[in-house]
Image: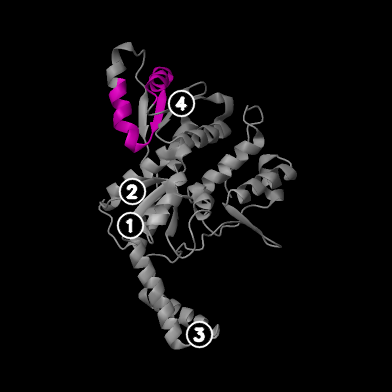
Amino acid sequence: MLNFQIQSDSEVPASKQLFAQIQFAIASGQYPPAHRLPSTRQLAMITGLHRNTISKVYQQLEESGLVESIAGSGIYVKLHERENIIKSDSPVAVSVKTIKESIDRVLELGCNIEQAKELFLEEIDWRISCCDRVMVTVPQRDIGAGKIIQQELQDSFSIEIELIELEKLPQILEKINFGTLVTNRYFIKEVLGIVPPNSFRVIPIDMYDFNKELELIKTLPAQACLGIVSVSEGTLSVASSIVNSQRGDELLVLTSSLSDRDRLRAVIRASHTIITGYTSYDLVKAEIVAMREDLIRVPDVISTDSYIGEKSIKLLQRELGISKIK
């Protein structure tokens, strides 16, 4: 069970702290699809929060489309209906057995063998058609996250990836019949609310778990200033909340988007350590070099390895039938 921490003296409400930590655990794959979340009683013992507060947080998570409540069983991370959960390294024998069982199930439902064949071929043809056009979609409010996803997928697979604002998706879907939409799991409910069934394939990706960076944050001395820089406003908000939940008032946390140069320079001047995405790392270092004569001290700059979790990269590699180039 994850060690959720609530800072009672933080300006951030306790419920918001818990929501951000659980949301991050889901988006980073620490709580994978179909994982059962702790009961309200268990979480109350860990965090010291009232069970009613935890119930409200779970309700917010369910409204966000990240979890689902199963009566008499508990709260589970929602498994997207089109998400392939078969392991990429499954033996051929297991795959054959799975296919046979699937055919048996279709026949039990009343289809004949010819109908079963047609259904399987239609599904395969649909998936192949969807691979012809791959798009990343996120809301305009966090278009920076979309840019990171787009860049990482293009770097990983060396294929053309389009970036579409979620608000413009309905117009795009009117012109295109098939394709694959990739989005952060944070936004899956919004995407599914737009995409018609049996048209575009929607694949949610999980974020990198940032365990290495979280361990580093634990070692920073009290009263140190930590800077966080990203092109994604959503990432900055979640990261700040997570760090405050872990260290409270012990650390001063300053954030800046890469596009706000004045804010970025202020973060560089004040910070002992800066954590930034690898897509922003070179630009942050270049800004530090340009400011070197004005700096009392040069901050340490730590680059994250990636934004997309490795499991999600492997999932897309399998689903799209392409090879990872690095």
Q: Identity of the amino acid at label 2?
A: Glu
Total marks shown come to 4
Q: Secondary structure at mark 3?
A: loop
Q: Position of residue 48 (x, y in %)?
A: 70, 39
| Segment tinted magenta in the rendering | 260-288
Foreground residue among 311 and 237: 237
Residue 226, which numbered label? 4
In primary-sequence order, the first of circles 1 and 3 is 3
Q: Position of residue 36 (x, y in %)?
A: 60, 57
Q: Secondary structure at mark 1?
A: loop
Q: Position of residue 4 (x, y in %)?
A: 60, 42
Task: Identify residue for label 1.
Answer: 133
Task: Identify residue for label 3.
Answer: 111
Q: Identity of the amino acid at label 1?
A: Arg
Q: Position of residue 232 (x, y in %)?
A: 43, 36
User: How many residues crowd around disc 3 within 10 Å: few (fewer than 14), some, or many (20 or more)?
Assistant: some
Q: Identity of the amino acid at label 4?
A: Leu
Is residue 205 shown left or right of residue 48? left
User: How many residues crowd around disc 4 within 10 Å: few (fewer than 14), some, or many (20 or more)?
Assistant: many
In primary-sequence order, the first of circles 4 and 3 is 3
